[in-house]
Image (cartoon, helix red, strand yellow):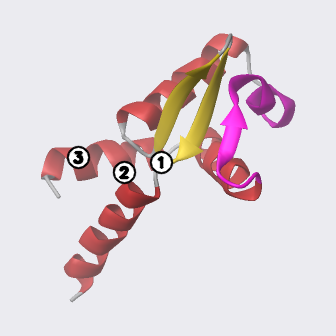
Amino acid sequence: MESKKVEKISKALADPNRLMILKSLRKNQNCLYCSDVSEFIDLAQPSISHHLKQLTDAELIISEKEGRNMKYTMNNKMIDQYIQFLQALKA
């Protein structure tokens, strides 16, 4: 994994709101809609969209347009690669 990708993921994971989004994704069988996020995070819609974009840009989640809504799913492959990178640092 490239250093820039690791840096981008690490920065995305450094925010408590983004971590909360990822945890909620895991609880909801890896699927959330943008409107669902506002139910558990007390932020304005533009702020929620910003956090979702940061997670999408880091490739931790995948966004998919479904009608008028955006559906977000966990990108387990990228998370696995990130974990492997961290484990390699330990070894």
Evaluate if marks 1 and 2 touch, with contact meaning CB atoms under 8 Å apart. Answer: yes
Badge 3 amino acid: Lys
Q: Is residue 21 above or below residue 84?
A: above
Q: Is residue 75 above or below residue 82?
A: above
Q: Is residue 70 above or below residue 16?
A: above
Q: Residue at x 13, y 52 (%)?
A: 2
Badge 2 amino acid: Ser
Give the x, y percent position of residue 46: 63, 12
Badge 1 amino acid: Ala
Q: Residue at x 67, y 49 (%)?
A: 25
CA distance separating discs 1 and 2: 6 Å
Evaluate if marks 3 and 2 touch, with contact meaning CB atoms under 8 Å apart. Answer: no
Give the x, y percent position of residue 67: 67, 14
Front residue of 52/44: it is 52
Q: Residue furthest right?
A: 39
Q: Work out whether mark 3 precedes mark 1 in sequence or the reverse, and give the earlier one.
A: 3
Report helix, strand or loop for mark 2.
Answer: helix
Q: Quadrant of residue 34?
A: top right
Q: Residue at x 29, y 80 (%)?
A: 87
For disc 1, the neighbor class at 10 Å (few under 14, some 14 to 19, many from 20) is few
Q: Which mark is residue 84?
A: none
Label 3 or label 1, whichever lies nearer to me, is 3
Q: Which mark is residue 14?
A: 1
Q: Quadrant of residue 45?
A: top right
Q: Residue at x 36, y 55 (%)?
A: 78
Q: Work out whether mark 3 precedes mark 2 in sequence or the reverse, and give the earlier one.
A: 3
Q: Which mark is residue 10?
A: 2
Report helix, strand or loop for mark 1.
Answer: loop
Give the x, y percent position of residue 20: 68, 47
**First to last magenta residue range:** 28-41
